[in-house]
Amino acid sequence: MDVSIYTKNYCPYCKRAVALLQKKNVAFNEVDVTHNDAIFQEIKKKTGWDTVPQIFIHGEFIGGCDDLYALDEAGKLDAKLGIQ
């Protein structure tokens, strides 16, 4: 599974997004940028966002926690993740 989520360890939205991915039982790469400003600056430049979480599925930036939950509520997240 090609899912990456950029997080900060004190962020409640990050924890909520991680919890949904765990509930979906998908493998994902969590990149904690709490103390790694270089990676955070790099990802901000890529997306134009200066908040976390930032979630990518198959290299596509899907947004943050609310976007992830909106995809799930619309019934589109499972297909995007490649699960039934």
Image (spheres, helix red, strand yellow):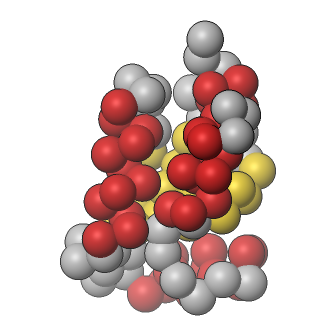
Q: Is residue 36 visible?
A: yes
Q: Name the residue nearer the viewer: 35 or 80.
A: 80
Residue 2: percent from left, percent from top: 60, 35
Q: Is residue 57 visible?
A: no
Q: Residue at x 66, y 20 (%)?
A: 82
Residue 60: percent from left, percent from top: 76, 50
Q: Name the residue nearer the viewer: 34 or 17.
A: 17
Quadrant including the C terminus: top right
Residue 10: percent from left, percent from top: 23, 77
Residue 41: percent from left, percent from top: 57, 86
Image-quadrant location for residue 75? top right
Q: Is residue 36 left or right of residue 58?
A: left
Q: Residue at x 73, y 75 (%)?
A: 47
Quadrant including the N terminus: top right
Q: Residue at x 43, y 28 (%)?
A: 24
Q: Name the residue nearer the viewer: 23 or 39.
A: 23
Q: Is residue 77 left or right of residue 12?
A: right
Q: Is residue 24 above or below residue 40?
A: above
Q: How many marks?
A: 0
Q: Is residue 43 above or below residue 51?
A: above
Q: Is residue 31 left or right of residue 62?
A: left
Q: Residue at x 48, y 68 (%)?
A: 53
Q: Is residue 16 above or below residue 43?
A: above
Q: Find the residue positioned furthest to the front.
A: 73
Q: Find the residue positioned furthest to the top.
A: 84
Q: Is residue 62 above or below residue 73?
A: below
